[in-house]
């Protein structure tokens, strides 16, 4: 089980480990060392050992980690054993692209409902996903047991839509807007900002030539 106080950086690496463990299992491998895992996922072995030790997974010297039991453990921890329906709010340029992509490579998450205020889009099916008016949001989130929302509305609408999502019972928000939204303590926000990422890359290119 994920304890609430594992570092965020560790939590972010778990899906990377899980993806590679699946590749190894498909190739018929039974165990893997932290060094082998490190080379494949480009994370140093000490970090991998520390990350896995948070969950009580301790490799055996000369044997490494048992792939099947690690896989089973990650499957539960990352809720891969359960399909997570996700909502998307704001079906504009970015929203459309995400609906079209719809996390095909993930077997535990998919966008199952989209919402917008624009009557030109609501009522339509976009990339196989129904687009509902905002008035239907609360009802659909409950019907489809949706706890996670992707936020792709204009920045000046981000906080008011967040408040609506929180009131409707959403527990996690993947925030693509540039606004740092405010939520209660029991709601998690993950910010995605491509501009920041690009600027960081430009910085590294300049300073580490
Ligand atoms: N994180 C990133 O890297 C990244 C990249 C591109 C855009 N963005 C951000 O994503 C957001 C969307 O960008 P875009 O280019 O798709 O914008 P867009 O204008 O094309 O789309 C916004 C959509 O939100 C809808 N909308 C407006 N108010 C709403 C409300 N109150 N409730 C529900 N829907 C509402 C609009 O009708 C529209 O369909 C912006 O905040 C933008 O800054 C982030």
Image (tube, rainbow, N blue to C red):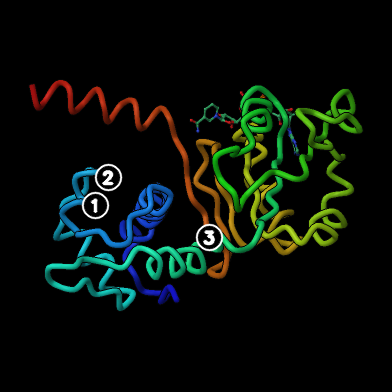
Tell me how many marks there are.
3
How crowded is the residue under tag 2: few (<14 C-alpha within 10 Å), some, or many (20+)? Answer: some
**Badge 2 is on which residue?**
41
For the residues labelled 3 and 1, the Cα–Cα distance comes to: 29 Å
**Image point 88% across, 23% down: which residue?**
120
Residue closer to the observer: 6 or 39: 39
Q: Secondary structure at mark 1?
A: helix
Circles 3 and 1: CB atoms closer than 8 Å? no
Residue closer to the observer: 74 or 143: 74
Residue 203 placement (x, y as % from top left): 20, 26
Residue 91, compared with residue 115, is above or below; it is: above
Foreground mark, 3 or 1?
1
Circles 2 and 1: CB atoms closer than 8 Å? yes
Which image quarter has ligand 1? top right
How crowded is the residue under tag 3: few (<14 C-alpha within 10 Å), some, or many (20+)? Answer: some
Residue 131 placement (x, y as % from top left): 83, 36
Residue 41, compared with residue 145, is above or below; it is: above
How crowded is the residue under tag 1: few (<14 C-alpha within 10 Å), some, or many (20+)? Answer: many
**Badge 1 is on which residue?**
37
> In terms of image quadrants, where is residue 166?
bottom right
Residue 204 placement (x, y as % from top left): 18, 28
**Badge 3 is on which residue?**
188
């Amino acid at each position: 089980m994920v304890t609430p106080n594992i570092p965020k950086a560790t939590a972010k690496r778990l899906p990377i480990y899980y993806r590679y463990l699946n590749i190894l299992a498909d190739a018929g491998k039974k165990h893997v060392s932290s060094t082998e895992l490190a080379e494949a996922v480009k994370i140093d072995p000490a970090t991998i050992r520390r990350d896995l030790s948070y969950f009580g997974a301790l490799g055996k010297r000369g044997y490494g980690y048992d792939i099947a039991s690690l896989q089973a453990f990650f499957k539960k921890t990352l809720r891969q054993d359960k399909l997570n329906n996700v909502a998307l709010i704001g079906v504009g340029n970015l929203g459309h692209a995400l609906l079209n992509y719809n996390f095909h490579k993930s077997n535990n998450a998919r966008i199952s409902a989209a919402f917008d205020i624009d009557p030109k889009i609501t009522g339509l099916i976009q990339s196989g996903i129904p687009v509902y008016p905002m008035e239907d949001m609360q009802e659909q989130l409950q019907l489809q047991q949706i706890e996670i929302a992707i936020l792709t509305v204009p920045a000046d609408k981000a906080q008011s839509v967040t408040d609506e999502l929180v009131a409707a019972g959403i527990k996690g928000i993947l925030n693509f807007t540039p606004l740092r939204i405010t939520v209660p303590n029991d709601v998690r926000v993950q910010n995605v900002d491509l501009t920041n990422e690009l600027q960081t890359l430009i910085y590294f290119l300049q300073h580490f030539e």
